[in-house]
Image (spheres, rainbow, N blue to C red):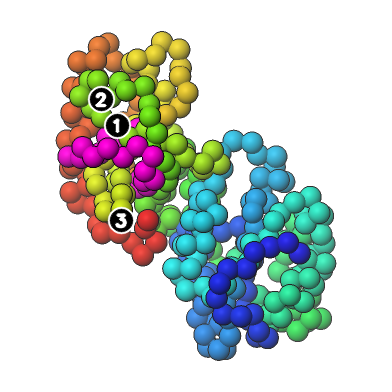
Amino acid sequence: MAGNNTEGKSSKTGAWITIGAFDGVHLGHQELIKRLVDGAKRDNCPSIVVTFFPNPIIHLRNIKEPFYLTVPEEKDKFLSRLGIDSILTISFNQSVSRLSPRDFISMLHQQLKFTCLLIGYDFRLGADRVGGFSTLEELGREMGFCVRTIDPLELGSQPVSSSSIRTAIKNGDIRAANKMLGYPYSIEGQVVHGDGRGKHIGLPTANMSIWDGKFLPGNGVYAAYAILDGNRHPAVVNIGVRPTFYEMPSEQTIEAHILNFSDQIYDVKIAIQFISRLRKENKYGSVSDLMDQVRKDISDTEEVLKNEPAQTNLST
């Protein structure tokens, strides 16, 4: 079975494992991981997350557009911060997708020698997703491991899920997404040269190039933080097509105006933490009208961030 095992405790008999995509490492995932780590510590054995890349949903649903809430490195970092000993990332491909639950679990058990499998309430495994809790329980009796499950984590009577987080982010409801994630949604990328319009009108912006698989918030203007060298700087971020300057929709851009900041940061990697959407992207009749709105955006951003709590333990 193809995969990469991160540094950590060596896999020995008695490991506790969980299996899943864990895209976003949201509050529901965090609760499952916490129980996994606690259970493994009680049994004095390693805790291991078995995950996949690409995400199986992309293959099964033939998804082409940006999808990921967390890039692989980001997901591994979050999982490690939750206390996991090892992460096994399996390359999900056509052959893996055709494996029966029995074949997949048998190969995994042979490799990891686990004695406890902890899964989420809606976990399904194998070709056509036929392997649910009862199937895994039967395999556990045969191979010598227990299967445990946890109830869904709910906010406002709705289960927290990666799909509901994507919907909130797409709609620009960053507050709702962050509440389900348990940390500010972020993107990371390199600062690249843009068309220079921002600097020309007295509003320098950092134009970002990010991984094309990363899921982006819907077009609009956001109060955010820019993270450079571990320091958080208030920023106004625009995602969109800049309709004031282009009659025809241009390529979608990500531009961050970092408040009270003038350093040259071309080719520098920065992260953006989204806190709240201020407004939708609009077309203005003149550059002067746009600048008036931007000044209001800056004021609104300062007001939003003034009462923003400190970073969580999973923040960038």
Q: CA distance from mark 2 to mark 3?
A: 25 Å
- Residue at the image position 25 percent from the left and 25 percent from the top: 199
Q: Does residue 92 appear to the left or right of 73 in the view shown?
A: right
- Residue at the image position 36 percent from the left and 22 percent from the top: 195
The mark that comes first in sequence, 1 or 3, is 1
x then y, percent, for residue 60: 72, 46
x then y, percent, for residue 155: 43, 57
Q: Secondary structure at mark 1?
A: loop
Q: Are marks 1 and 3 in contact (CB under 8 Å)?
A: no
Residue 118 seen in this snapshot: no
Residue nearest the observer in this picture, 44 or 200: 200
Q: Amino acid at mark 2?
A: Lys
Residue 68 seen in this snapshot: yes
Q: Secondary structure at mark 3?
A: loop
Q: CA distance from mark 1 to mark 3?
A: 19 Å
**Figure quadrant of the N terminus:** bottom right
Q: Amino acid at mark 1?
A: Thr
Q: Secondary structure at mark 2?
A: helix
Circle 3 residue: 230
Residue neighbourhood size for the residue with mark 1, other residues' Cα within 10 Å, grouped as few (<14), some (14–19), many (≥20): many
Q: Are marks 1 and 2 in contact (CB under 8 Å)?
A: yes
Q: Is residue 61 magenta?
A: no
Magenta segment range? 254-273
Q: Amino acid at mark 3?
A: Gly
Circle 2 residue: 199
